[in-house]
């Protein structure tokens, strides 16, 4: 059974969506639906149903190739801009496991075909940030069983990756999201599904600066032992 954690923190007003498997208002502790803690929006359907673990305050356990495909399209309570290229931030807490046979999708904003912002894992267990169909613009080596707090920001011209509160790299990039759909853990053409554990997932309708990215990290680091 999930437990109730407060969803409020300093950046809550900039959240477009906020999922927490450990919050009973977001995830009931079983089943295939996870709901946002911000505003009123239909939930993401996760199929096949993931396993719930009470560790780290409640996490989803995802089985890889045949597990946990989720998607939602449409508008959100704090809408992203209608233009295709806009400032935004993706945040997720993950712990990888297994050995990927293909690149695994972890979190994506956009469509499942093109024009999107993807957080993925390579076959060599490397965290990647990819505009869909393009080579990775950021990479960071991961180890199975460890927790990683990932923040990927975009201001309309520059992409920055932070891992566990540390700025990893910054590059000029074009990231387009014509449709503001969300894909969790897979169900994307050309990618396998993520194998590992997932905790808090947040998306913002702004590009977090370095201080804000660190504040997002400090808001959850104790829960995941970081």
Image: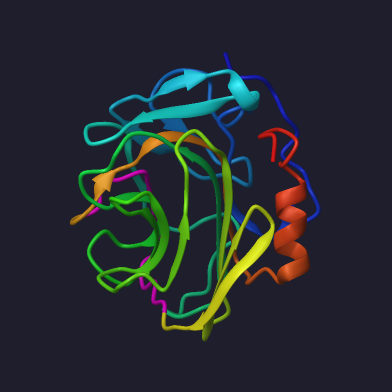
Q: Quadrant of residue 99?
A: top left
Question: Which residue is located at x 52 percent, y 55 percent?
Answer: 76
* Image quadrant containing the N terminus: top right
Q: Nearer the viewer, residue 123 or 26?
A: 123
Q: Nearer the viewer, residue 185 or 80?
A: 185
From the top left corner, tell me how far across and down residue 80 is, in percent: 53, 67
- Does the segment drawn in magenta span residue 176? yes
In this view, the residue farthest toward the top is 1
Q: Quadrant of residue 181?
A: bottom left
- Does the segment drawn in magenta span residue 217? no
From the top left corner, tell me how far across and down residue 147 is, in percent: 57, 39
Is residue 134 visible in the rendered structure shown here? Answer: yes
Question: Which residue is located at x 70 percent, y 61 percent?
Answer: 213
In this view, the residue farthest toward the right is 10
From the top left corner, tell me how far across and down residue 180 is, in percent: 41, 63
* Image quadrant containing the C terminus: top right
Q: Is residue 24 above or below residue 215?
A: above
Magenta residues? 175-188
Q: Nearer the viewer, residue 98 or 213?
A: 98
Q: Is residue 99 above or below residue 49?
A: below
Q: In the figure, is residue 106 to the left or right of 224? A: left
The colour scheme is rainbow
Is residue 11 visible in the rendered structure shown here? Answer: no
Principal secondary structure, stretch drawn in magenta:
loop
Q: In the figure, is residue 186 to the left or right of 212? A: left
Question: Which residue is located at x 27 percent, y 53 percent?
Answer: 103
């Amino acid at each position: 059974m999930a437990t109730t954690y407060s969803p409020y923190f300093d950046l809550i007003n900039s959240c477009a969506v906020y999922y927490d498997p450990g919050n009973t208002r977001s995830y009931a502790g079983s089943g295939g639906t996870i709901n946002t803690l911000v505003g009123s929006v239909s939930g993401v359907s996760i199929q096949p149903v993931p396993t719930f673990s009470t560790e780290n305050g409640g996490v989803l356990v995802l089985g890889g190739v045949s597990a946990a495909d989720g998607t939602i399209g449409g508008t959100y309570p704090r809408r992203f801009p209608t233009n295709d290229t806009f400032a935004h931030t993706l945040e997720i807490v993950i712990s990888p496991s297994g050995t990927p046979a293909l690149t695994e999708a972890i979190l994506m904003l956009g469509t499942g075909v093109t024009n999107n912002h993807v957080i993925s894992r390579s076959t060599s267990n490397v965290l990647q940030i990819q505009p869909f169909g393009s080579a990775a613009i950021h990479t960071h080596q991961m180890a199975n069983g460890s927790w990683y707090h990932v923040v990927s920001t975009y201001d309309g011209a520059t992409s920055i990756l932070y891992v566990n509160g540390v700025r990893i790299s910054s590059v000029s990039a074009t990231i387009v999201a014509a449709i503001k759909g969300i894909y969790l853990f897979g169900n994307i053409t050309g990618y396998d599904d993520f194998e590992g554990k997932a905790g808090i997932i947040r998306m913002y309708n702004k590009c977090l600066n370095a201080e804000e990215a660190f504040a997002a990290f400090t808001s959850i680091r104790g829960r995941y032992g970081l």
